[in-house]
Image (tube, rainbow, N blue to C red):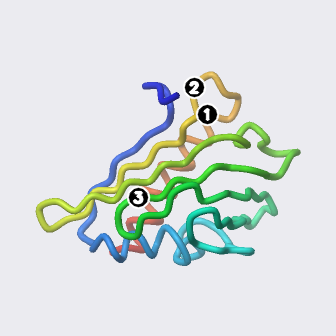
């Protein structure tokens, strides 16, 4: 299922795994988008909406506090980016050497997709700039 071409990124941050985990749940509104209909637990879901009105709904497949979260995109703005529906977003939070490593992979977001260039550069901005700034 996973291939080397799926979008992935690794970020090292001087924040606790607890703070990182919180930022990947109810804290998403400070760095990613506006959250609604949120139920952060296994089999829960949430919808994220952006300033331009685009939105996605994710089902939470795995929910391991301070360690790992897996979301599956189950619905979204059809006129903008229906390519994401069915994608799996996998977050790992690893504590090492007094820092926390965030490993993120969007399984399904490959260079063959129409949106790959814009989506990968937007993820880089949200994760490297907005999330890191929020956690610092």
Q: Residue furthest top?
A: 112
Q: Is residue 15 above or below residue 113?
A: below
Mark 2 lies on residue: 111
Q: Residue furthest front?
A: 43
Q: Residue furthest left?
A: 97
Residue beneath the point at 62% across and 40% down? 118
Mark 1 lies on residue: 116
Q: Give the CA distance from mark 1 to mark 3.
A: 24 Å
**Which numbered disc covers residue 3?**
none
Which quadrant of the view contains residue 134?
bottom left
Packing grade of label 2 (10 A; few <14, some 14-19, many >=20) is few
Residue beneath the point at 58% across and 65% down? 32
First-in-chain label (1 vs 3): 3
Residue 74 position in % (x across, y down): 74, 50
Packing grade of label 3 (10 A; few <14, some 14-19, many >=20) is some
**Pointer 1 with pointer 2, Cβ within 8 A:** yes
């Amino acid at each position: 299922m996973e291939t080397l071409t799926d979008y992935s990124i690794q970020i090292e941050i001087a924040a606790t795994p607890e703070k990182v985990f919180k930022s990947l749940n109810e804290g998403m509104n400070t760095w990613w988008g506006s959250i609604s209909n949120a139920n952060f637990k296994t089999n829960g879901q949430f919808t994220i909406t952006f300033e331009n009105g685009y939105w996605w709904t994710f089902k939470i497949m795995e929910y391991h506090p301070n360690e790992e979260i897996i979301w599956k995109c189950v619905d979204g703005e059809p006129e903008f980016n229906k390519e994401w529906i069915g994608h799996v977003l996998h977050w790992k939070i690893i504590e090492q050497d007094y820092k926390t490593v965030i490993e993120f992979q969007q399984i399904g977001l490959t260079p063959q997709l129409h949106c790959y260039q814009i989506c990968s550069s937007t993820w880089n901005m949200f994760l490297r700039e907005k999330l890191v700034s929020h956690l610092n």
